[in-house]
Image: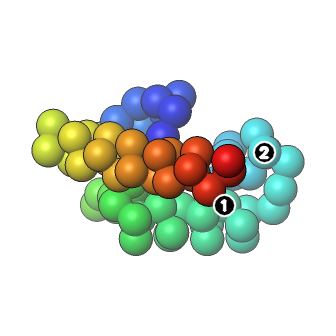
Amino acid sequence: MSGELPAGDRLRIRGLAAEVGTSEMPVREAIRRLEEAGFVERTPHKGAVVKGLNLAELVHLHDVRRLLEVETARAGT
C-alpha cells in the first residue's frame, strides 16, 4: 500500500520473513490474504507478485479512504 514494493515485484517468502523477523508461515498467510484482497496475484513460474492498480481501482481506493477517514475523524471528536 505504501508503494515500497512496486507493481510486478516478486514476493519471496524467505526474504520477507527474514526482513520482518518472523517464520515463513505468517508471511504465507499474509500473502494469501493480500491475494484475496486483490493486491497480489499469482503468476505461473513466478509465484506471488505485487499487483498494479489501474486508474479506476486507484480512484475507488481513494474514495473509500476518504469516506473512512471522515468517519474516523467524526467518531474521534
Q: Which image quadrant is residue 23 in? A: bottom right
Residue at (53%, 62%) from the top-left corner? Answer: 31
Residue 46: mark in rendering: none
Label 1 belongs to which residue?
A: 27
Classify residue 10 as left or right of residue 72. Answer: left
Classify residue 74 as left or right of residue 34. Answer: right
Q: Amino acid at mark 2?
A: Val
Q: Where's residue 16, x and y in %? A: 67, 46
Q: Residues within 10 Å of mark 2 (few under 14, many from 20)?
A: few
Quick check: can you spot residue 38?
A: yes
Q: Where's residue 41, x and y in %? A: 33, 58
Q: Amino acid at mark 1?
A: Val
Label 2 belongs to which residue?
A: 20
Identify the secondary structure beneath mark 2: helix
Label 2–label 1 contact, CB within 8 A: yes
Front position in the image: 4 or 12: 4
Residue at (50%, 69%) from the top-left corner? Answer: 32
Of the image marks 2 and 1, the number of the one nearer the N terminus: 2
Q: Where's residue 11, x and y in %? A: 51, 47
User: Disc 2 versus disc 1: distance between alpha carbons?
Assistant: 9 Å
